[in-house]
Image (cartoon, rainbow, N blue to C red):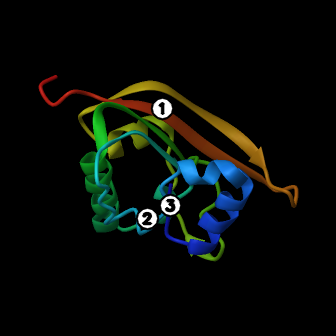
């Protein structure tokens, strides 16, 4: 499991209790993360939408491609096209399903895409876009 924040990893590790030893814990920025071997699943809930600059998005997508095995799956959630324009005081990039798939780019097959309204603990609605993609083999 990778996260930019050690504190977030500590919480996840504590939740897993004795099973935490089965996980490799990595502190790192998703734009430059390089794993020892490709993974079969890349799950991102609410990181990509904070990358509002095209150069940062490209770094992230380059990292995704470098670390995801062919045939591997991407589960990606971002703020939806009607979602907030800012979160935690930071600007965000909003996507609909088609826009998110287009931004991820060639080499991926859309398996499922949908938009869903999430209600925060404070009661505020937030629209999210979710996609499940499969990385195509290099010769596809």
Task: Name which of mark 3 and mark 2 comes first in the sequence.
Answer: 3
Neighbour tally class for label 1: few under 14, some 14-19, many 20 plus, Cα within 10 Å: some
x%, y% of residue 30?
40, 62
Q: Which mark is residue 38?
A: none
Q: Which mark is residue 132?
A: 1
Q: Which residue is mark 3?
A: 25
Q: Is residue 126 left or right of residue 43?
A: right
Tell me which residue sits at (32%, 56%) in the image: 35
Instruction: Give the camera-side residue of 5 and 118.
Output: 5
Disc 2 vs disc 1: which is toward the camera? 1
| First in sequence: mark 1 vs mark 3 | 3
Percent position of residue 25, x then y: 50, 60
Q: Quadrant of the C terminus?
A: top left
User: In the structure shown, which secondary structural element does the residue marked by tag 2 occupy?
Assistant: loop
Q: Residue at x 57, y 53 (%)?
A: 21
Sequence order check, earlier mark of 2 and 1: 2
- Which element is circle 1 on? strand
């Amino acid at each position: 499991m990778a996260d930019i924040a050690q504190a977030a990893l500590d919480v996840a590790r504590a939740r897993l209790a004795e099973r935490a030893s089965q996980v490799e814990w990595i502190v790192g920025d998703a734009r430059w993360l390089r794993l020892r071997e490709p993974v079969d699943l890349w799950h991102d809930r609410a990181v990509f939408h904070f990358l509002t600059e095209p150069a940062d998005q490209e770094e992230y997508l380059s990292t995704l491609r470098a670390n995801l095995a062919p045939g591997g799956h991407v589960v990606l959630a971002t703020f939806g096209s009607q979602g907030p324009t800012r979160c935690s005081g930071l600007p965000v990039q909003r996507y609909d399903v088609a826009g998110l798939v287009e931004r991820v780019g060639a080499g991926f097959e859309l398996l499922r895409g949908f938009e869903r309204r999430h209600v925060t603990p404070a009661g505020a609605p937030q629209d999210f876009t979710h996609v499940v993609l499969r990385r195509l083999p290099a010769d596809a």
